[in-house]
Amino acid sequence: MLINRMGTMVLPFMTLYLTRSLHYSVATAGMVVSLWGVGSICGAFLGGKFTDKFGFYYLQIIALIGGGLLFILLGQMHHLTTICITTFVLSLVNESFRPANSAAIAHYSKVENRTRSYSLNRLAINLGWAAGGALGGFIASKSYTALFWIDGLTNILAATMLWLKLAPSKNAATLKKPQEHPKPATSAYRDKLYLVFIVLTTLFAYSFFQSFTTLPVYFRNKLQITETQIGLIMAMNGILIALFEMVIVHNLEGRLHILKYISVGVTLTGISFMIFNLLPGAFAVAVISEIVITIGEVLSMPFMNSFWISRSSESNRGQYAALYSMCWSAAQVLGPSSGSLIAEEWGFHTLWWFIGGICLLATLGYIWLYKKVRPATT
């Protein structure tokens, strides 16, 4: 995951690439990024199905190699139609990795250290994100095309490492084929409280994804922050999470209900966007906003993983992981396109108030959900 995420450079700079390098409008760029989300929904659904049926290991290998080749191909596309088609197929293949990876973490970990296991995985992701974001900003200022090659090659390198270290023939903990389980008593798609959680998490993800799509455009066009500075701000998020998340999760886990932590985290996420309407300045305000959203991320995302895994079993884990991935993908469909449209039609200030309101609505929903599940969970 560290190797893979160190090359994550395309998606954070996709909007800037389309608007500044290929000279498409902000709305068009938002539509292309939304197509990524459409492919992600399909990929997450198929990934969950294939994980439960065929196991997590080989699906991860195929998704990484296929995604790597498609990243390189996307960098060669310049016509809008071919960009849209390649983006959709790439996201479908790439996103099928997520349910398999979530199931793999659950498989390799134990119940007593599962939340920390997901945090450790996020540590690798965010260390890679910090390196990739900082380096990506520098590379983007020189050549956007190079971003696609780096992203693709690190995908393939991650697949190579997965084969060298965790192949069934080389690691006894990796199953050669999925174990047979009885049909689960509860389907994830019929778990009503979990479906409420998915809707609320979609609202949160819708807001959170603005930080990778409309927010960089706001930084560049309205606050006049350079690509290199944008990369450093994004890297700060990864560095702070790498330094503090596991320590914070270790100290907080078990003290309060996980939905309480999620509620606070979602509230802080909303505040991080409204800050731009409340405080003057440019680079300093962007840094403050990034710190606030990072705290919100630390208090929400690790515990969101804990919530869905607590409601699943080995026989239906792919379903639960797929739904969780799909809600993020759905947000990626709705977020960039509608956020870009709001920014173009009514301005960024309106967008930031709107995002703050969405987060407040989600917070109220998580509080309601807490009251419903409290008797059944710790």
Image (tube, rainbow, N blue to C red):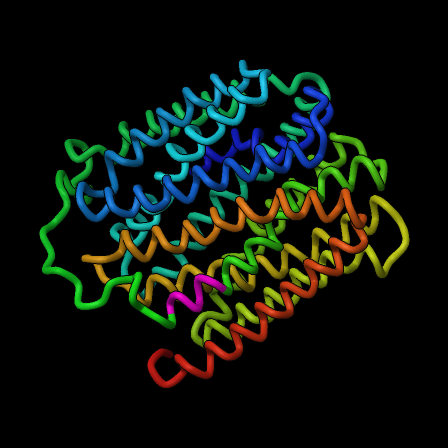
Q: Quadrant of the C terminus?
A: bottom left
**Above or below for 351 versus 87:** below
| Residue at point 50%, 25% (across, down) | 151
- Residue 165 at x, y = what percent? 27, 32
| Residue at point 47%, 25% (across, down) | 85
* Residue nearer the viewer, 364 or 283: 364
Secondary structure mostly taken by the magenta-highlighted segment of the chain: helix
Horizontally, is 281 left or right of 191 in the view? right
**Range of residues picked out in magenta:** 194-199
User: Is 196 a magenta residue?
Assistant: yes
User: Is 11 a magenta residue?
Assistant: no
**Above or below for 78 versus 15:** above
**Above or below for 286 versus 357:** above
Residue projecting furthest to the right: 280
Horizontally, is 144 left or right of 199 in the view? right
| Residue at point 58%, 57% (across, down) | 297
Count of marks, rendered view? 0
Q: Quadrant of the N terminus?
A: top left
**Above or below for 64 versus 69:** below
